Amino acid sequence: MTQGPPALERPRRPHRGSGTGAQVWIFRHGEVAEQFLGLAYGGMDVPLSESGQRESLALAARFAAVPFRAVVASTLVRARALGLALAQASGAPLETAPGLVEIFRGRFQGRPMKELLAQHEAELAAIYDDPWNYRAHGGETDADVLARAWPVLESALARHGGPLAIACHYNVVRNLVAHALGLEPHASFRLRVDLTAGVLLEDAPGGWRLLRANVRSPGRARAATR
């Protein structure tokens, strides 16, 4: 039986990183096709809407001047489309990584959110109260997501340096940022990351730092390299 990646410690303090000064942009994919809106689609491989496709291309165009060393994308089509757009716009190589796919929702996956709220309110509350451990629904925990996603980030930085772009999903963004900053899992839900928006982390000498959050343009952020 193949073992998964080792479990990471529950975050309690900012991750000390490597102090390289490298920057990592982590993006959330665009809007999904209409028939999937309102569903807890989680790890399902659902396509983008036409609007989501346009928004992905527009985001990539705004980041075309950022000298990404590489773009790493989830293997799910909605994030992979954004990764491809970023790679083509910036000229960076594209890699895909299954470790970046969205959280698996277990028996809740694919069901309407309205139905889940009406029939499973207590279970949903339990997930938000303790996302690091709750798995009674048969799905993944935050610990599971982080154990597969954080090594992707570290490996890409080790091989390529920064600036690095990662195209993935809300719960993956949330967990990566929480681990970098040392946020408690339940507090990480306060992090807002809209569709086709991103956050900018820096592997600073004193530990990981959050430079920008929920933005759709690079602004004047320093293009740190390694």
Image: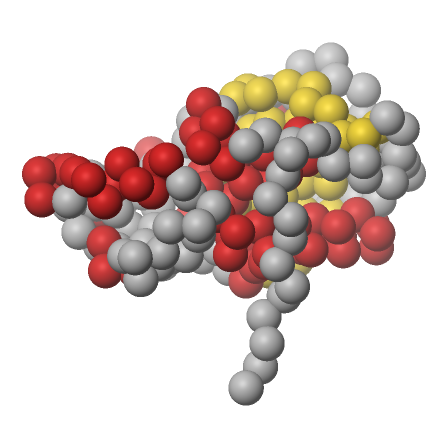
Residue 187, given in percent of the width and then of the height, sits at 48, 27
Which quadrant of the figure contains the C terminus?
top right
Which quadrant of the figure contains the N terminus?
bottom right
Q: Name the outermost residue toward the top.
A: 220
Residue 169, given in percent of the width and then of the height, sits at 47, 43
Q: Could you say which quadrant of the image residue 189 lies in?
A: top left
| Left or right: 130, with 180 as reference point | left
| Left or right: 121, with 6 as reference point | left
Q: Nearer the viewer, residue 72 or 141?
A: 141
Q: Could you say which quadrant of the image residue 198 lies in?
A: top right
Q: Is residue 115 above or below residue 93?
A: above
Is residue 112 in sight in this rendering? yes
| Left or right: 70, with 79 as reference point | right
Q: Nearer the viewer, residue 131 or 192?
A: 131
State how many labels appear.
0
Residue 2, given in percent of the width and then of the height, sits at 58, 81
Is residue 85 in sight in this rendering? no
Q: Is residue 9 above or below residue 129?
A: below
Q: Is residue 163 above or below residue 141?
A: above
Q: Name the outermost residue toward the bottom.
A: 1
Residue 153, given in percent of the width and then of the height, sits at 69, 49
Q: Residue at x 35, y 36 (%)?
A: 128
